[in-house]
Every structure is written in structure tokens, then in C-alpha cells.
Amino acid sequence: MPSSSPRYPLELLAPAGDSDALDAALAAGADAVYFGVGILNARRRARNLRTEDLAAAVRRVHDHGARAYLTLNTDITERELGQAARLLELARQAGVDAVLVRDPALLAWPGLFPNLSFHLSTQGCATNAADVAAARRLGLSRVVLARELSLPEIAAAAGVPGIETELFVQGALCYGVSGRCLLSSWGGGRSGNRGLCASPCRVPWRVGEHGPGQVLSMRDLSAVDRLEELSRAGVTAIKIEGRMKNAAWVAAAVRLYRQALDGAAAGDLHAAAADLGAYTGRRLTSAYLDGQRDHLTGTAGREDTATAADEATTPENDDANETTNADEADDGAGGDTNAETMRTYALAIAAGADGIRCRCTCEGQVRDWVLPRTQVRRAGTGVAAAEVLRELAAADLQGFRLAAESSSAEAEMVLAPRTVRGIRDQLSAFLHQRRRQASQRPRLDLPEAVRAALVRAAPDASNTRMLGERPDRVRLSASALPAFARAVPAVTLVVEGAAAADLDAWLAAVPAARLVVALPAVIFPDRLGLAEALLQRAAAAGLRLEVNSLGMADRARAAGASWEAGPGLAVLNSLAARALRDWGAAAVCLSVEADRQQLEEVSRACPAPAVLQVYGRPPLLVTRVEVPRACLGEVFADRRGIRLVPRQEDGLAVYRPQEPCSLMHLRNPGIRVAHLAADLVGAPDPVAEWHSLGQPRAERAFTFNYDRRLT
Ligand code: SF4
């Protein structure tokens, strides 16, 4: 149990990846626990709690005098909105104390669920006091601060009155700023922003001719001996990362931090913290608190207790993790099978002595079947097992989606058409049965106000430009603007990396109507003044702003500026678009990660003018880690052939892919937006690249997640 008068009165918040960890955390003295239910959380690979266990779990938490926090901190697709609303209502009924969110749709919902507080997840990328103040204005009661802040920066954020702050003190660190990382999504559709990161930053990378080495793999965080400073800085709560870690580790971590809060000697704490660190084998650091941004990564920071291959598939970061646990794929709130609720199933195909063995796992139920091994009689008619999975992933079956962990032991195994039909038939029958059983479960009635909030508005009339038409917008870095504006008339220019002092010269050369001034997506306190000066100057000049953070949205509103929401506030559902429109955004940006179906669904219902990026090199990693000067501009390559190039942008290192993705060759009348944008930031020669866009290419372009699935 917590001591009644700890030396440092900070709330101790522990991870509960499952019921055992939850009980262990409570027994060890946690003041609060956080957990996910089902799949809408940034830790989808954790076992998570089941909906039917939620009320009892919350009762146990409250019986210990602790608080229960639910993580619902992923980007939400159009189909998942109903599921999210039902989960929130279920949480409210169960007595959950707070929910951690990130999606703009959910940021608009505090107040809809009485007695349920809303916290901004670290996936919400709160890096400065303006972000914290914006969260307060939205009605949130707490913000989980970015992990890259120094002590004075934490103090400034925690000094915003009327809202609490929470900080990670132990566990894994991301190389990229949380909530802004697209690396795993780029590599295979497994998005950190959807709770499925495969931790590609942990694998070896070659840098130019050097390596490979684990140059992007961060040390783990441990601030067990810094609690006095954090207490003085004014944070409310300290948080232990580790929903993938077992109950014994959680208990040890909570005991350690309880001792630290009670004022134990630093020497004793260090030894115990080292034991905790042995779980991953990485060395520990609290260097960000001191403003140190180098020597935080690499093999030098790692002992050899885990392999790189393990890490590529076993992420440990609390707010960025991987694969769906099919046992927990229930929509979590009453079994409604309408279109808003997308359940998942996993399928494994393998060759056995008795034939082709298949296993489908769906909502805790498993069906096995074996199909005879039929010979492929006619050349060209066989289908590779991996292709069968790809085809299943391309379309929903009985209202279910194929989960990311679906596999074939032998991807190249060729199956006869008859076998493929057999797989589909059995699968369909099983899923149909699951669907019927689910529909017989009691339904959770949503309050009238919540049902009203789920009603979609009419799509905005300006969303008429079809995917396949020529882009009418170009995204550029400030240094490329003058030459580009002279060479390419008639397109709107969205300019990144500007300074307030640049604007007069630009306005002398380019009509204001052609310019949109983009504010950074990540603004640490050392650049906050520059961003605010740019915002004020652009607003005074009547220029439109592109806003990419909550804090700047708040400031743009206050300044009466014309602004639109950029990729940093990207939307994956139409209610997020509506929320941003209601905050004052004149346009919204569809998520560059979205797959074809998601783009169709969100654009069909988008109640604000929408922007779709159809070409470019999106920022895959934005980091505060100092990248050695010699590595800037070098190619970082992993074993799978992903190639990144870091550059300095707005005071941070930004890794963009060497080669662009492109939807330029696609036509889809089902995707209609107000603007199609080509992102030429990172292009070696933006003018030449713009002129090349309309020309047919020999090789097929990489379409990011459009042709596969964002999971
Ligand atoms: S989300 Fe974190 S763990 Fe995943 S790739 Fe990005 S930096 Fe690495």
C-alpha cells in the first residue's frame, strides 16, 4: 500500500498489460494503473483486459484506494468510431477514472461521459506549455508530457494552471517523438499511431558505408533518482512504461518507485533500477532531463541479452507498439455488429503431414481445419499462400478484417484453386458463426448525447477533386520557395521552415493567396518563441497558416488567424475533421498513412475541405536526438531495404525516405478532396521533380499503405 506521507507526493502510475500485472501493481503500492481494453490502444500486442473483466478490474483498483486509467490513444478509423464511443460508455459505467486519448474526434468528447476525465496521451505530442494550455481549453484534465523534455522545460509545461501533468520515468524510449513516427507504418503498414509499431528503429542500420549498428535504438529511461527534481518541477504523476512486461517486473518497478517516493537512498535505488533494466538489456539514462541529446543510442548502450531480431518484433515502448491480440479483438461494448464496428480475425496456413492446416482465431475462439493437399494441375492456376492472405486482407469477410499477425509458415507454398476455395468457405462459415453469436450479446445503449455526437455531418461541398487529378498544391521547404515560385506558377505553395523575417520578401514575390505558412509539427520549448513570432507575423499579413500541433491551433484561434490543420493533426475519421473544423480549421489533412478503404470512407463523410498528399517523402522520424553532423544527408539503410535520409529541419533531425511514395498514377472517384498535394520537401530538385510528376514511370511507384492495409 502507498505510504500515507511520501516524501515526494507524486502519483505513481503503473502499467497493467493484463490482470496479473494489475494485481501486482496494486499489491506493490501503485496509486493508479493504466490499461487497454481490446484493440483501440497504443499497446495492442499486450494481452490487455477484456471488456467483460473491466468492471471487476476497476472495482479491485478502487478497493485498493487507487485510480484506473483506460488507454484509448490510437488514431481511430471511420469504422471504429462507434466502437470507441461504446468503450468510453462502458468505461464510464465501470467507474474508470480517466481515459487517455489522442484522436481529435475523442479530444472533442470530454463532457459527453460524466465522471470520466480525459487525459492527453503522450501520443498527443505535448512538447510545450502551449500544447498543455490547449489541452486544458479542450476540457482535458491532464497531459502526458513528451519524454524528450529537460527539467526546466517540464517545469514550464507543468506550470500551466488548471491542468495536471504526467511524465514517464522508467522504461523504453522512442527514437522519434511519440505520435509523429511513421517508420513502422512505412515499412509494412504496422503503425505506431495505431498501436502496432514493429520497432524498426531497434534493428541494425547501415549509415552510408558504415555499420550496420543499432544507431537508432535508444537506451531505456530511468529517473528513479530524480524524483525530488520532478516534484519541484511540479508534475502531478510519474509513470512507469511496460504494458508488455510481466507482473513480476511491474511489481518490482512499483516497489522501487514507492521506495524512491518515500525517500530511499540513491545507492539502493540504482542497484534495483539496474535489475529492472536487465529486462531489456539496454543501459539506462535520464539524460533528456539534463538537456543532453547525444550518446543516447547505439550498440554501446546495449548489453547482449536480446537480439536485434527480437526487437524488430518485440517492441517495448508504451505508446508505440505492435500486433493485434486476436483474443481481445472484441469491439468491447455490447456486440453491435454494425459497420462502425470492425472486428478482426487471424489466420495461419501451414503444410502438415495430413494436408494444408489452417487455424483461424477470432474473439478468443479458435477453429482448426485441414484441407487435402490438392495438386496444381494447370500451370499458372496455383496461388501462393502469401497471396491468399493478401487477397483476404484486401476485403473484409463477414464484417471481419484479417489481423496483422496472420501468417503462412511457407509463404511460397502454392495452393490449388480448390484448396483456396476451401480455405475461404471454412473461414466464412466460422466468421459468420462468430458474428451471429456476437449479435446475440446484450447491447450497450449509448446516451442520447453520445449518439448525437456520432451522427455524421454532410460532406463539405468543396471536396470534388478526384484522386488521379493533377495536384494543385506543393509542399516546399523555405529555401526552395523563391526558385520554385518563379518556375511553377498557379499552384498553392505550403512552405515549411519559414522564419517571421522571411515573410516580407516572399510577399513581394508571391501573391499572398498562393502561400500557406506551415508551422512545425513538433515544437520544443527552445523553438516556441520562433513559432509564435511566425504565427503572429503571418496572421498580421493575412497569410493562411497550416497548423500542426494543438498548441499552435489554440494560438492561431486566439490570434484570429486563418488556419488549416496539417499532417501533424492528420485525420483518419470524419468526426476528427469535424472537431478540427469546429475549432476553427478551414481545412483538414487526411492521414498519409491511410489505406484505400480508409481514404474512401473518411473522404466520403468529411465535413471540412480535405487535403490529400498524393506524392512525397513524408517525415518518418522526427527526433530530438542529436544526429552527428557527418550523418546528416547520409543514407540509413536496414536489411529490408528501407532507406532514410536525415536532415535538419526546424531545429530537429527529420528522417525522410530516400525515394518518394506516389498515388499520382491512381484514379479513384471514391476519393474526393478539396486539394491534392505533392510534398517536395526532401526532393533533391523540387522544380525538376514537379515537372517529372506528370510523366509515365517505368517502375511502379510505392503507394505507402494505399494498396496494402494500415493495421
Ligand atoms: S514508434 Fe517508437 S519504437 Fe516505433 S519505430 Fe518509431 S521510434 Fe521506434
Image (tube, grey):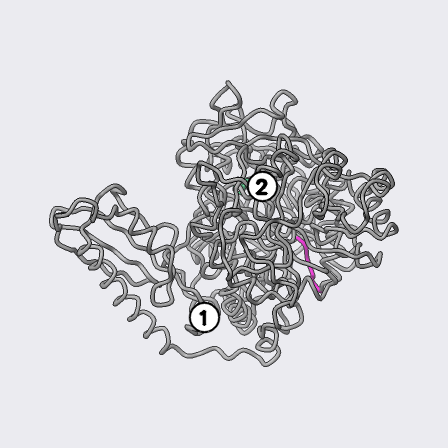
Q: Nearer the viewer, residue 421 or 155?
A: 421
Eyeballing the image, is 151 above or below 672? above
Ligand 1 within 8 A of label 1's CB?
no
Residue for badge 2: 616
Helix, strand, or loop for circle 2? strand
Q: Quadrant of the N terminus?
A: bottom right
Question: In this view of the protein, can residue 3 be seen by the observer?
Answer: no
Q: Residue at x 56, y 29 (%)?
A: 297
Residue 546: x and y, percent?
73, 51
Ligand 1 within 8 A of label 2's CB?
no
Neighbor class of circle 2 (other Cα within 10 Å; few <14, some 14-19, many 20+) is many
| Secondary structure predominantly adopted by residues drawn in magenta | loop
| Location of residue 109 by image quarter | bottom right
Q: CA distance from mark 1 to mark 2?
A: 32 Å
Side (left or right) of 603 relative to 132: left
Q: Nearer the viewer, residue 215 or 259?
A: 215
Residue for badge 1: 339
Eyeballing the image, is 678 above or below 142? above
Q: Nearer the viewer, residue 695 or 504?
A: 695
Residue 194: x and y, percent?
51, 53
The amino acid type of the residue labelled 1 equals Ala
Side (left or right) of 250 relative to 140: left
Q: Residue at x 44, y 31 (%)?
A: 641
- Bounds of the magenta span? 139-143
